[in-house]
Amino acid sequence: MLIGTIDTLVRRAPAIVAAAARDLGSISLGLRFGDGSAAVLEAPRRILSARREDPPLAHPVEVHFDDRALAMLFDGSGTAASEALERSLDMRGSREDLLTAWRVFALLSQRASGLRAVQAIWVAYRIAKGNDAWTPPAPAIPPKRARGAAYWKPAQWPALKWLEARHPASVELLKRGEPVLAPARSLWNGRDAHSWQETPDIFDNDVHATMASCKKRVIAEILKLVPNSAPQRDLYQLMRDYVTREGKGLRPTLVLATCLAMGGRVDDGVRAAAALEMFHNGFLVHDDIADESTHRRGKPTLHMLHGVGLAVNAGDAMHLFAVDLVLSNLATLGLARTLTLIHEILHMCRETVEGQAIELGWIRRNFVPSRNADYSRMSTKKTGWYTCISPCRVGAAAAGISAPAELDHFNEAFRLIGIAFQIQDDVLNLVGETALYGKEPLGDLLEGKRTVMMIHLFRTAPRATVRRMRAINALARTAKTLGHAEEMLAAMQRVGSIDYAVALAHRLANSGVARFERDLAHVPDNAGKAVLRQIANYVTIRTL
């Protein structure tokens, strides 16, 4: 249950995990449960993780739980001081470390308990254990003031009932019956009007569900615009292909979340988000042709399926329809906001083609830069702007923000986050699971992409190795084999290029999170800003 809870939080609410990891620091926390199982809670690289420990080892800080204590912690039926019993809820360690551990538990129970995915794990565990283990004993003397029959009935979970009554799915921020951005949900103690442990008014959205919901909403907007007339087979079906393929939904989510964070409505940002998604898919079609890629999002690329000519034309059409989507905001957002959107999107496109030119030029000249700064500049231009920075600026513009100084608040935080995100994508191409990554394995090496790993390899490997790697890069894409790519990957692993890139990505991501909190401190906490915070922290704990 513990491991499942932490893994779920890593995927769905990384801001919670990041906050808990910051509190836990370097402490290795031993956990002992009433059924005899044991686990360790740690935060290596500021990423919270839980693992089984069999047999259990001694730790400087240990916490013992039984089912009574677990019920008390989740339902908040009492304070720690009144409920602590030996081997039931028993904490051992130094005073400072125990206070740290308790802060971590308080944060997790208070903030994670509002996520339905976490509740499902605890409900399943509770059912498996049986109601008796979780039902609080009836009071010896009935209280003078009724606390509500639901609290004492077996098979009832007051915290969940109250959460559902206060924040039912039917009243979340909806569009056509689908949640787009869920509001905050916090745990109740089952009896009183307030939690027994107060926390700041923080919004913890399920980032996984939010991105899926935002992407679905934006795709529906796109598909409304794509004609049902001819030529379907050779144009419009091709456009629908890339748009409807599986993807993270990062850009649409950033647009809608920023629009909401800056005082706009979800509807204000939908057309702009759809335009960015159309531009993105058009870029992907053309990139795949330029890079001679064979797979995209787990399927053959468009030019592999239909030929280069039809694929190029479909990419051109996506960009045309993207412009149409931007201009369609005139009727709903007015001239000033629409002009700001046009300005932002044109700037995004210029940065993107400049970045693409830099990388393609390196590949054509068989040049590998020696500095990380060169990669950062190329990556920021090629993917950083249209992946992270521009979606935020476009969302703010849709909400009515046009002052350059206000829009610039997003730049540095999401520049750092964007570079970290791209480095992680580059690493995943080399060592990630193909089913999760969705692209050709080792495709970046076959295409000659100038990644941080390649730059590090050329900077640190022996001269003979560098000469061999340069000769491989000089081969045409069609002349390279998987053996060539595996040879280069092995060379990277020998000199530690993969580990170097992972460490660099984490440093950049953590710096980006810090800049996010500082540069956007003036924006009040709300459901939209919560999603931005979750995405910022998502990069710091993304699985590699």
Image: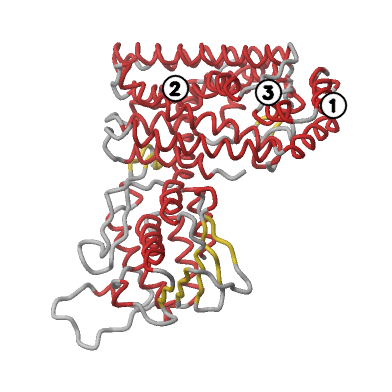
Query: Which amino acid does the dot numbered 3 rest on?
Result: Arg
Please give the count of numbered marks on the rendered protein: 3
Tell me which numbered mark, 2 or 1, is placed earlier along the sequence.
Answer: 2
Residue carrying label 2: 390
Residue on which the image places disc 1:
464
- Answer with the quarter of the image where residue 300 lies: top right
What number is the disc on residue 450? 3
Q: What residue lies at 55% left-to-right and 78% top-to-bottom?
A: 36
For residue 26, which numbered disc appears in the image?
none
Callout 1, which amino acid?
Ala
Q: CA distance from mark 2 to mark 1?
A: 42 Å
Few, some or many C-alpha atoms within 10 Å of disc 2 (few <14, some 14-19, many ≥20)? many
Q: Quadrant of the C terminus?
A: top right
| Residue at point 40%, 78% (across, down) | 68
In the image shown, does 292 or 214 lie closer to the viewer? 292
* 458, 119: nearer the viewer: 458
Q: Secondary structure at mark 2?
A: helix
Q: Residues within 10 Å of mark 1 (few under 14, many from 20)?
A: few
One can see residue 122 in this view: yes
- Are discs 2 and 1 less than 8 Å apart at CB? no
